[in-house]
Amino acid sequence: MYIEDTIVAVATPPGTGGLAVLRVSGPAALAVADKAFRPGRPGAPLPSQAPSHSVHHGHVVHEGMVVDEVLVTVLRAPRTYTREDTVEVGCHGGACVTRMVLEAFMAAGARHAAPGEFTRRAFLNGRIDLAQAEAVADLIHARSARAALAAGAQLSGLLSRRIEALRESLLNVLAHLEAHLDFPDEDIDPETGARLEARVVQALSGARALSDSARHGRLLREGARVAIVGPPNAGKSSLLNALLGVERAIVSDVPGTTRDTVEDMATVAGFPVVLVDTAGIRESTDAIELEGMRRSRDAARAADMVLEVADVTLPPPGPGPMEVGAGTACLRVANKCDMAEHPGFVGHPGWIRVSCRTGTGLEGLREAMAASLGGPGGGSHAEEVAVSARHQDALRRSMEGMTAALESMRAGRALDLVAADLRVAWNAVGEVAGKTTTEDLLDRIFSTFCIGK
């Protein structure tokens, strides 16, 4: 991959549509467009003669034949996505005609772009940092409005600013230590040493707060797995259907209708969730039903949240019947609240009462689910920070370096040992924004992008 190449790709999804957009970027983008594009009226400028951020009507030509009628947008460096000269071509959206337009620009001298190569060039040319580049992919693949807002906040630099503040704080401490290493006869006085230690403690706290948002980030990116468990006929399948808004699972008065797990995606108060309906738990000798109950228990152990559903017209169950994973949120849901409650349920605390038949209480359940998963439902979440697994790994190594540096400072060890640990921490923090990175890491990150972005 060479940044001096001129690249081209279709930036819109494949398939049939009204419009498609091709993006051309690189030092020869305007010259390539001159060869592939014919202005729509005599005397109109070629792309290389046109002013920046201007749109031009004409035709794409290839081997003397008109391929399609198009609009060409000329964008001159550095005010472009990649900070390179860029041409965007709006053509008709049929799969065949789009491919023909792409081939015309490749024949004119552009190379087909690799996945994520436009965004990689934006990073390499300093327009965005690595955390912002990753946010581009998160924004494209966001499964909910809340996930899109979090990705948008990261793209705008929210995470990058917090990372840069961490690096700056560590760099200031390092600079102070390096100055004393240059003059070994001068000891750090106790007051100054205490201030330096306090700054490292503060940086460590900031790194830990960012690292702790990794679970929240995973839930926003991948969706939370929510297992719906409970005895037969409690209304688990009805609750799945009610939360989805469609009849996804079979509902019957016959106990044990659900023999296997049933999954589907939904959005609950801004969170993408994977709802998992499970087989009812009861005493049974039926081999198929027993296998269904085993899968129910597995689903509960793998879930981020468990909804234990009970029939409010029957005696309340005892403690939750499922073994759940560490940190799994558990909510108890009393269904059929449109009917008379069993005396044992009256005044019983800790249950969220709903009626899947009438919809009563479902909004309160959604709000409780959102709160348990990571914050109140509704409202603006534009300031959410949700780090990825890669960010968390870099922050973990940074925290290890800061912790080791603090131990050395408190034990009165040599300053060069303290400085070495802080350099490890500083470099690890820099990996989040791409200040310190490797070609292999960049290849791995941008290979996950779609072609054309």
Image (cartoon, rainbow, N blue to C red):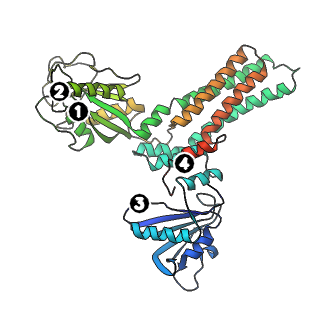
Residue at horizontal 54%, vertical 55%?
114
Q: Residues within 10 Å of mark 2 (few under 14, many from 20)?
A: many
Asked if the residue under mark 1 is in contact with the one under mark 2, i.e. CB atoms within 8 Å, the reply is no
First reached walking from the N terminus: tag 2 or tag 4: 2
Residue at the outermost bottom position: 42
- Which residue lies under the disc numbered 2? 232
Residue at the outermost left position: 254
Front residue of 161/44: it is: 44
Distance of mark 2 from mark 1, alpha carbons?
13 Å
**Kind of residue sitting beneath label 3:** Pro
432 on left or right of 449:
right
**Kind of residue sitting beneath label 4:** Phe
The image position of residue 190, as x and y in percent, is: 78, 16
Q: Which mark is residue 446?
A: 4
126 on left or right of 138:
right
Q: Which mark is residue 321?
A: none
First reached walking from the N terminus: tag 4 or tag 3: 3
The image position of residue 252, as x and y in percent, is: 12, 35
Q: Residues within 10 Å of mark 3 (few under 14, many from 20)?
A: few
128 on left or right of 170:
left
Q: Callout 1: helix, strand or loop?
A: loop
Q: Callout 2: helix, strand or loop?
A: loop
Q: Is residue 386 above or below residue 1?
A: above
Distance of mark 2 from mark 3, alpha carbons?
45 Å
Q: Callout 3: helix, strand or loop?
A: loop
- Which residue lies under the disc numbered 3? 14
Quadrant of the rendered image containing residue 106: bottom right
